[in-house]
Image: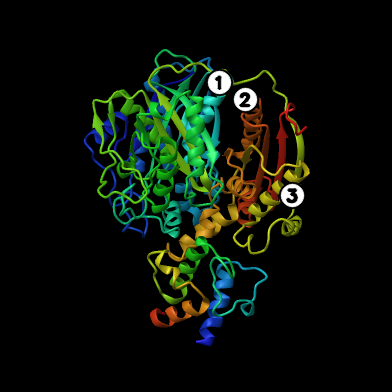
Amino acid sequence: MDELIYTLKTQIIEALSLEEITPEDIEDDAPLFGQGLGLDSIDALELIVLLDKNYGIKLKNPAESKSIFASVRTIAHYVAENRTK
Amino acid sequence: MIAITGYGILCAIGNNADEVLCSLQQQQSGIGPMQYLESKLRHLPVGEVKLSNDRMKALLGIQDAAPVSRTAMMGAIAIRQAVQDAGIALEGKRVTLISGTTVGCMDVTEQYYEEMKTDDGLLSLPMNNDCGMSTHDMAVMAGLEDVETCTVSTACSSALNAIILGAEMLKNDEADIVIAGGAESLTRFHLNGFNTLMILDSERCRPFDETRAGLNLGEGAAFVVLQRECSGAKAYVAGYANRCDAFHQTASSDNGEGAFLAMHDALAMAQLTPADIQYVNAHGTGTPNNDLSESQALMRIFGTQMPEVSSTKPFTGHTTSASGAIETVICLLAMQHDFTPCNLGWKKQMAAGITPTRGHTGVQLNHVLCNSFGFGGNDSLLVLSRKCPPEASEYSADEAVVELARDEIHSMEDLVALKDFVSPIESRRMGKLMKAAILTSCRALKAAHIETPDAIITATASGMLEFSQQFLDDIIRNDEQFLKPTLFMQSTHNTLSSAIAIRTKCHGYNITYSHGSDSFAWAMRDAKRQIKSGKAKTVLVGCFDESTALSNDFCKRAGKPTAPEISAVAIILASPNSSYK
């Protein structure tokens, strides 16, 4: 799980063009949206593309993805359970 | 007064005004499976014009086998219809053709994109997301090669802003006849772009319905002939407004502030009260966000006295930048034939929303409102009246403007200063041209001691070329999968002006000119008009363009000069009578 979490952090940094942020700056359980990194609805759409492209996960509804995208750890759990590649 | 003396239209429900009228009255939708567009997203219904490109060529008498843009052909067909409908002679008159479009000839660009990279025989095709070229092609195909042309690009409100510009130019005596409207064909670029934002419905759209789940893309063109004279008028442009929501690049504010302000201004200009409006053709895209925001704005204006409201997008699909003109013509048909169009397919009352009309016949419509909103919060609308509205003098003799400040960037190194105004996390999605536009605008405003200008007017020949090209490359490379919304969002040319509006909290007039090398001249003309008419005391004018390795390679192969990697100029203009001088 730790390896997946680290990989996800690097993928998130690249997908969202988070300049000046390293994987070490993102805490596993810190909120990604609102507080914490302060991501927004467009970032959520980018994360949906990330999961589709890298893990074959197709999320249909941005609103439903909210709980999945709560933190890097919640994303990692969802990916571990639902990945098709 | 501004009279509409003719109109032309083609869209999913008809190839001319008679056919469109018939479909509206018989409540027949034009949305269905794609027939002409070649895309992998075949599960998405679309509102296509029921003519092949070859058929359009035949209608326009084009013999040449070379590729011709569907957007430009649809525009030319609608322009020809409009001029014929007005029954006017253009000889000896000052005629201006104004078209609104978002991605110009993208249908041709995306089809030949890969070949264009190496085949010099295709160098005459538009390679730079060039909206101005589509207007030029339309003028030539419509037999209007000698008229003045202009292109407005404010995403989905483009065509409506073209009509507003036409009215302004007539009032300011800059033309005798204006032919204004817009055209946009379906493209893989647009369909995939909207798909990345996850706002497309795989069923027919259901505006203002509790179960609404997004929009259907459509295509088409419509143009109106505008004149100052009263004789031969089919209706009058009694009021109009262009306001900015200044909230988000792709979403409307919860309370519909921009739309509310625009409706308020347009009613005031028309010297009407909300109770005078009998019908509203809503923007009503069918996305959860638009319909809720627009409902809130309508409720704030009309309260409990809500007129009949419908979205006609379940008929036509969302024809994006053409929609403002297409729906203006639908309003004109409703006024001339005494009916209100149905909000097709509506079943379930939405929470906190308006209740749309199922349509009525036998209603004499004296005053109607036509709403048209676009990405970036570009909210524009028209008040159309059956009778000649009271004359209102708008322009002072004072034409002078003063330049308060100017800021320029011509190299990538200059962008490091952006961090003085924008944090790295805030700038994470900004392309280089966006960074340059924000930086020059912030510095120019600071130098002029202004926080919020009254109006923002930008000029760009090809907008954010780098992101547009990356999006096109991704469409081809990834076979229409895994596409990034960030790239698409910034491919609309008004993304710069709306980002400046969001940053400066400017709810005022907001427009983008995309007419090749004339873009800046049109922007300056408009800025002076805004100041002269007293609508704005301070105007931010931005002229922004970028180049890419690919665009410069095209230039070299075509024997044209290459363009700098980045070029941004922000100018603050003000009325000499304002306290800012």
Pointer 3 chain: B
The reply, left or right, for residue B63 in relation to residue B151 is left
Label disc, if present, on residue B533 of the rendered structure: 2
Gap between marks 3 and 1, in whole Å?
36 Å
The one nearer the camera, B416 or B67, is: B416
Residue B497 x/y as whole percent: 60, 45
Judged from the image, the secondary structure of the residue bearing numbered disc 2 is loop
The reply, left or right, for residue B190 in relation to residue B305 is right
The crowding category of the residue bearing disc 1, from other C-alpha atoms within 10 Å (few below 14, some 14 to 19, many at least 20), is many
Asked if the residues shown at circle 2 and circle 1 are in contact, with their CB atoms under 8 angstroms apart, the answer is: yes
**Vertical arrangement, residue B37 with respect to residue B323, above or below:** below
Label disc, if present, on residue B171 of the rendered structure: 1
Residue shown at 48% from the left, 24% from the top: B270
Residue shown at 45% from the left, 16% from the top: B89
The crowding category of the residue bearing disc 3, from other C-alpha atoms within 10 Å (few below 14, some 14 to 19, many at least 20), is some
The one nearer the camera, B477 or B252, is: B252
Q: Amino acid at mark 1?
A: Lys
**First in sequence: mark 3 vs mark 1:** 1
Q: Which residue is mark 3?
A: B409
